[in-house]
Amino acid sequence: MSHTASHVVIGASRGIGNDLAKQLFEQNAGGTIVGTMRKADESVLPKGVQIESLDMTKQSSVDSCAAKFGAIDTLIVNAAMGSPDTMLGSDASLLSSYLETNVVGTHRAVLAFLPALRKGKKKQIILLSSTSGSCDLQRNEPSGFQGPYSVSKTATNSLGIQYHNELKDEGFTVLLIHPGWVATDMGKQINDGRGAKTTQQSASDILKILSNLKPEQSGSYLRETGEPLNW
């Protein structure tokens, strides 16, 4: 039996994705709010949020989850791996792991959920990116995670642009959002997280952008403040 969902948040077990699912539910966003995680754990999200198992590195897991939905308005892809690895300190295997999770995994999820998104009303694909994916910022103001994480996020940005180009005529809105420097497990690896915003604040900022999102904004790369980022 297929279901209709207003929002599917991939990577909702903790951090920003967890707070996105919670706040969408609290805001009564309409329809069913779905949070996915590699191992379903009902204790991490409010009762009423539909929890599904999904491992972005496994095709069968992604397909099994996506097949449960007949229509989806908004897909938010949040799951990613990241550590302060340097490029020259990373062998080919580590780089492959970053690309498999952050790029191939994202594409795997978007393709699997695309039939349901095509039947949704809003047709929104939201990819959580990073300033680490900006070649301009990495060249001039290197900050955050660099190395293979940066490479994977630059590729994620390119994915988003290709989705925009290929889906805009169908009425899709594709957006890339940098969530800010956030006190997640990843963010705390930089300066012990001192000065970082909370996951709750980051999720709130992202949802403010989504609440006013217009189709003509498709293909944009934004900070959590709504400010455009250089590619």
Image: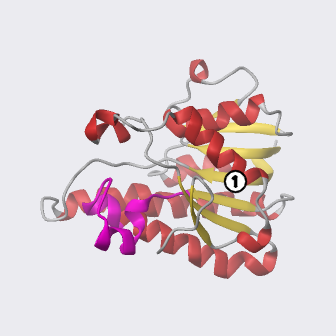
Nearest the camera: 181 or 121? 181
Q: In this rendering, would 170 be left or right of 22? A: right
Residue at the (47%, 51%) spot, across then down: 58
Numbered circles on residues, count: 1
Q: Is residue 139 magenta?
A: yes
Q: Is residue 202 magenta?
A: no
Q: Is residue 221 visible?
A: yes
Q: Nearer the viewer, residue 28 or 163?
A: 28
On the image, the x and y values in percent for residue 67 come to 70, 50
Q: Quadrant of residue 134?
A: bottom left
Q: Residue at x 33, y 53 (%)?
A: 144
> Residue at coordinates 58% horizontally, 78% vertically from top-left?
162
- x then y, percent, for residue 57: 44, 52
Against 68, residue 71 (above or below) is below
Q: Residue furthest left?
A: 89
Which sits in the foreground, 130 or 98? 130
Query: Hey, what amino acid is under mark 1?
Result: Ile
Q: Quadrant of residue 110?
A: bottom right
Relative height, residue 114 to residue 23 (above, below): below
Q: Position of residue 118 (x, y in %)?
A: 79, 65
Range shown magenta: 128-151
How are the residues colored? secondary structure
- Residue at which label 1 appears: 209
Q: How dense is the environment of label 1, judged by Cα within 10 Å: few (below 14), some, or many (20 and up)?
A: some
Q: Circle 1 — which element?
A: helix
Image side of residue 200 versus residue 1, left or right: left
Q: Residue at x 63, y 64 (%)?
A: 175
Could one spot residue 67 in this view of the protein? no
